[in-house]
Amino acid sequence: MTTTPIGRRGFLKGALGIGALAATGSLAACAAPGGTGTQPSRLARPSASASAAKGEITIWNRSGDLFKVFDAAIAKFRQAYPNVTVNHQAVDIDAKLANTLISGTDVPDGSFWDDAKIGGQAEHLYDLTDLIAPYQDQTSPYKLSVNTVDGKIYGVPWDLDPGLLWYREDILESAGVDPAGLATYDDLLAAARTIKEKDPRTAPIHLEKTPFLSQLWLEMLANQQGTSLSDAQGRLRLDSAEYRRILTWIRGAVDDGLVTHAPYLEQADVNTLDNGQQVFVPWAIWWSFAPQQLLKKTKGKWRAAPLPAWTPGGARSGAMGGSSFIIPAKAKNPELAWLLYEFLCFKEPGYTAVYGPNDIYPGGLSTSIPSYRPALDPAKPLFRPIEALGGQDLWKVAVEAAETIPAAAPIPWWWAQSVDYLGNNVQRLMEGKMTPDQVISESAEKIQRNLIDRS
Amino acid sequence: MRIGSIRLTPYLFIAPFFVVFAAFGLYPLIYALQLSFMRWRGGSQARWVGLDNYLYLLTSPDFWASLGNSAVMWLLIVPLQIVAGLGGAVLLANARLRLRGFFRVAFIAPFVTPVVAMAQVWIVVFDQDYGLVNYLLNLVGLPDVGWLTTTAWSKPTLALLFLWKTTGFAIIILLAGLQAVPGGVYEAASLDGASRLRQFWSITVPLVRRSMAFLVVIQTLAVFQMFAEPHVVTEGGPYGSTTTAGLHLYDHITASDLGTGAANSFLLVLLVFGLSLASVRMLRPKDEVS
């Protein structure tokens, strides 16, 4: 029996038919994207006791030394909660967490995350307000505010990163500058001029060259004055006296040739820190890594002090960065994840295990401090004095400075994207290509149009 | 198997391709098209906004700036790549070339090297303070250049990375076109007294025009989709000067502005389609046009 081969028309008809079927099926399957729009779940306190708490949780953390520190601290948790198994995973959180929360697939029970990113994903997280309530009055107001969206708390506040003024004690001594006299930013400029007059090769004040970190640094200076990029209602407040004051100060320092514009701890920055060109680094406590690990030639010559204030008697610190822990709304064992984070943040064995001396950091973790105030006793340091800071008790300096940090507003979801506008324009200001008013007007206009209005 | 006079068996054989295409090609395409008319940040319900995403992009200076950056990259890359590709193809087609195998490997090796790895090398080599290139410039008394940190040099430096990576592919395409040219044409031209340069210009170039047109279309697509190089090397900076169309689209996704990202991708498709069509028409041989 002969069979007729498929003709061209027949093939096209068949292909069109299958394609039409597929398209119709696709359109029918294309329900409007998105969830049901229900309110985030409120996580209640687990009723089980420590010995009765039972199950397995998956916890995400960034890889590196901090992962090892938490690993050791989790071992302490397991001693307190012997029937809870913790699957602690090192994950590229920046690349994976947001997409995982949105897709709802293979969601961990808890994760470490930057404060700046939590607010933007609040609808995928558990409302932890009831759980944080017993600790609320004893937690840094700043950390509570950045974890709060529409009156609900979505992150377990972990670390506080107070800004400090790092300086070369030997250079100040030789120039006759008393670090105790650096009470305001005008005092800092005057000291920088004195140092430069004595040694014209210096450009004493560090200004950050990367847009993201320079914006984070700007926010530290704004937080000192009790403000931030947006208020609790999400309204932009860049066009304000506080930001104008900061940007004018920066531009003045640039115009007077008092700055070294270098990228954070890259080779160019390290060289100018070690050779005495840079003398003052207003930066978060996590700059303490530099004298301990990177600044071989000037080890022991750096010290830390509270930041100058913007006005006499003003706050002597602001927060720069910081992280918390989140519990996704689709976590399988959220109550057990809460028990872990409660242990690490609010229980003495937990935060001592994280910050105290350990195999990874024999002197203790000195790149941040807890945000839980009972842990912040100046007389009971969790980490030891730093040899690279000439034996200075950094704990005392940081804790006393942190006491002055004002509360802030939740970090808006668009903060990271605003770096393309504000961060870049701050760089132009530091290069002398823009005035403070230009930075404010252009950045505000673009942030409003491209980010806030697109919400 | 039959339904009436229609044999079903052949259709069953080709059905798997269409099913897979529908699932992984057509469905995402239609989903993205639907999303391009909506405002959705990946969480709660998306809402219909009609043409708002498209209008926003078409009136956005950042969108046009990214297209401009891609256009400049195209000008820096494609013409030079055609010339270099043709030169490399002519070299490899030369029967008297020694170490032909070595040259083939040398030309194709960059193409198979992971782009992220090479991007890291580029960052080190072109570092303003400690990079090899500035070191060599200093040796001859020239000052440092901000290869990756100034708006003047960041695009050419990235274009160089793209050229280094993909010119091997261009050589392969043009070599295939070159090898399709009958040898007798060159013999006849030699007998008529045509010089080598004349032969190249009057025989080689016209006869590989189709291959060149194909290459222009492929590389136009690649340049406008360029993402890994600016993302890894410069993160779109300094000051957005290396934010290409592909990277700008990615920025919408990372900002969770998914509807605008989808609209951006369709606008890019239309643009690249138009450019490719124009390129093909421009490079079409004259006899084909008539």
Image (cartoon, coloured by chain):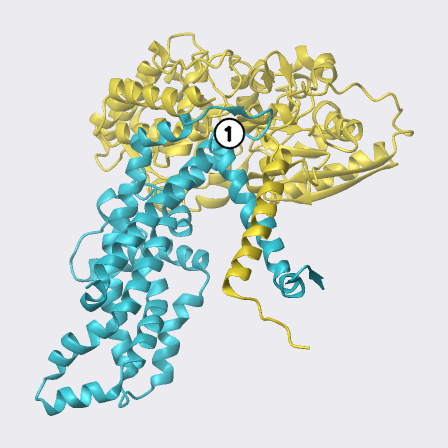
Q: Residue at x 60, y 24 (%)?
A: B44
- Quarter-wise, where is residue A369 in the image? top right
Q: Residues within 10 Å of mark 1 (few under 14, many from 20)?
A: many
Q: Is residue A129 left or right of residue B178?
A: right
Mark 1, secondary structure of its residue? helix
In the depicted view, which residue is nearer to us: A422 or A290? A422
Disc tally is 1
Residue that protrudes farthest toward the left in the picture: B193
Instruction: Provide the letter of the chain coloured cyan.
Output: B
In the depicted view, which residue is nearer to us: A356 or A65? A65
Specify the quadrant that holds the N terminus of chain B: bottom right
Q: Colour of chain A?
A: yellow
Q: Is residue A393 visible?
A: no
In the depicted view, which residue is nearer to us: A19 or B185? A19
Read off the residue under disc 1: A285
Q: Residue at x 66, y 28 (%)?
A: A326
Q: Position of residue A282 (x, y in %)?
A: 40, 27
Q: Position of residue A107 (x, y in %)?
A: 69, 37
